[in-house]
Image: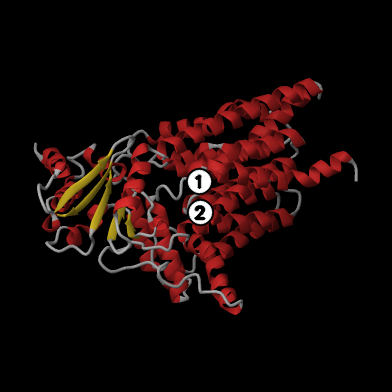
Amino acid sequence: MTSPDRWRRLLLPAVFAATLVLQGGGLAGDLPLSHRTDEVRNAAHILSMVDRGSLDPQVYSYPALFFNLHAGPWRLARVVAPALGGADPSDPPSRPIVATVGTGFAPAPWVLLLFRLQALVVSASLAALTTAAARRAGAHLLPAALVGLVLGASLLATSTGATLAPDGPAALFVLGAVWAALPGRQDGDLLVAGLCTGAAAACKYTAGLVLLVPLLAGVRSVRGLALLLGATGVVFGLGNPTLLTHPAGVLEGLAYESAHYSGGHAGAEGAPLPFYLRTLGMALGPALLLLPAALAGERRRGVLAILAFVGLSLLFLGRFPVRFARNVLPLSGPLLVVAALGAQAVWAALGRRQIALGAVGLLLAASGVAGAIASRRVIAERHSDALVTSRDWLADRVPPSARLLVEGYGPFVSDLGLSATYVMAAHEAAADLARDEPPFDLLVLAEGSYGRYLQDPAAYGDELHRYAAIASQWCELARFEGGDAISVLAPARASAGDCSQPLLERFSSALTP
């Protein structure tokens, strides 16, 4: 085997392994310090599916394939582990509880870590597939490898691609469709593109817009069009069977998401299109400068198809005031494939000299370094003094028998031997927490959650009223500063002395005209 052949064989495993090391070594590894709100809800529903032996997540905000993909390893472990003499990994206390706090989740210490590992493998696969798609489209080995690493180091991949959300799997299938569609020489390519497009839409509805890429870049016959559309429809239907079994629930979920994105998420509203463009710019950096050059290359039709997909997606997402960075993760890989083709075109225009290849390589490497620095900065902000000191305080002072309720962006404490239930936001449990005898001994509130509602009291009066009702029944034992503040509270009835209620004052003040 010649040296170039050896490098080609090692390319994808190397990009995959490098991304695992990069993200697992700190960029995405913010557990066990904190938990994220979407992960709590999604983990609860996935383990509930495993417990019920059902393919129906019974929540319809996302299509079903996302939940079933992540439930698969747990279902397998449930069969294999007892056969090997081990314990059922889905046994309590890892199961979700749906008692006093809706979708609250009381996990064993390792449960969220294993879910994060699943997502990390998806994220590393996303980086490797970006490289594979760039190579198959005709990019040189060096830029193809670098665009994969740029994605692996980017803020989008480390912050959202490696968390338990539908965007990572959807982005993976989007890239699969791009991988198949750009050569587009045979009907088999369109069949694979259709399979991936259907799977992408069955993970995240908006990802189905990637259908534009094979439609514009690969279809050259009626037979090819039929294969593409047929494969897309079949996989989408199989991956999202709730369309047939619970159509009313799916429509209700779509209506909820539409209302949510139309203006219902504190702290994530306003100027969506500039926000998404800025997010892509921060994540992909100077690599975006190579996009125009790709239009002069050999894959111009495919490049235009990808840009049409990205443009239409951004226009659709830009219609809704609520915006999240994770929504553009499925766009990042295809854009980097175009950047690799742009690097190829620049290299060809400069006579394929090694110095030209080195120059475009340096540009892409700079994008990766910039992305890694931005990712590290965001993760460092999440590892705030408040989170670290609140975890230490709880570990030192709280007995294992205490029952804790921790809201989103608060400290993850299950690995400390404490019994904790996690919720997205404490106001969702107001009916229980505002009782004279609440079902928890300690309440941990995080400014990262409640602070969003304080930004616009007029729009979120109901949520603030619920927080005020909670705060009136609890006394603050400790408050931790440094980043978003963390407060530990105990029921007022259990207070042995003065009852400090600064959060009550804060919520009441916000509600006062």
Label 2: how many residues lie within 10 Å, few (<14), some (14-19) or many (20+)?
A: many
Label 1: how many residues lie within 10 Å, few (<14), some (14-19) or many (20+)?
A: many
For residue 385, which quarter of the picture?
A: top left
Instruction: Give percent across and percent down for residue 316.
Output: 44, 42
Instruction: Give percent across and percent down for residue 417.
Output: 39, 60
Numbered mark located on residue 338 in the image: none
Farthest residue to the front: give it: 396
In the rendered view, would you say 404 is above or below 1? below
Specify which label sits upstream in the sequence, 1 or 2: 1
User: Distance of mark 1 from mark 2, alpha carbons?
Assistant: 9 Å
Q: Nearer the viewer, residue 365 or 297?
A: 365
Q: Nearer the viewer, residue 414 or 251?
A: 414
Could you tell me which secondary element the residue under label 1 belongs to? loop
Could you tell me which secondary element the residue under label 2 belongs to? helix
Instruction: Give percent across and percent down for residue 213.
Output: 61, 45
Q: Which residue is mark 2?
A: 116
Q: Are marks 1 and 2 in contact (CB under 8 Å)?
A: yes
Name the residue rendered at 17%, 43% in the picture.
503
The image quadrant where one finds the C terminus is: top left
Q: Nearer the viewer, residue 471 or 389?
A: 389
Residue 219 visible in rendering: no
Instruction: Give percent across and percent down for residue 294.
Output: 67, 30
Name the residue rendered at 42%, 31% in the picture.
274
Residue 369 visible in rendering: yes
Q: Which residue is mark 1?
A: 29
Labels 1, 2: front one: 1
Q: Nearer the viewer, residue 5 or 422?
A: 422
Left or right: residue 454 versus residue 26 is left
For residue 492, which quarter of the picture?
A: bottom left
User: The disc labelled 2 sits on which kind of residue?
Assistant: Arg
Q: How many marks?
A: 2
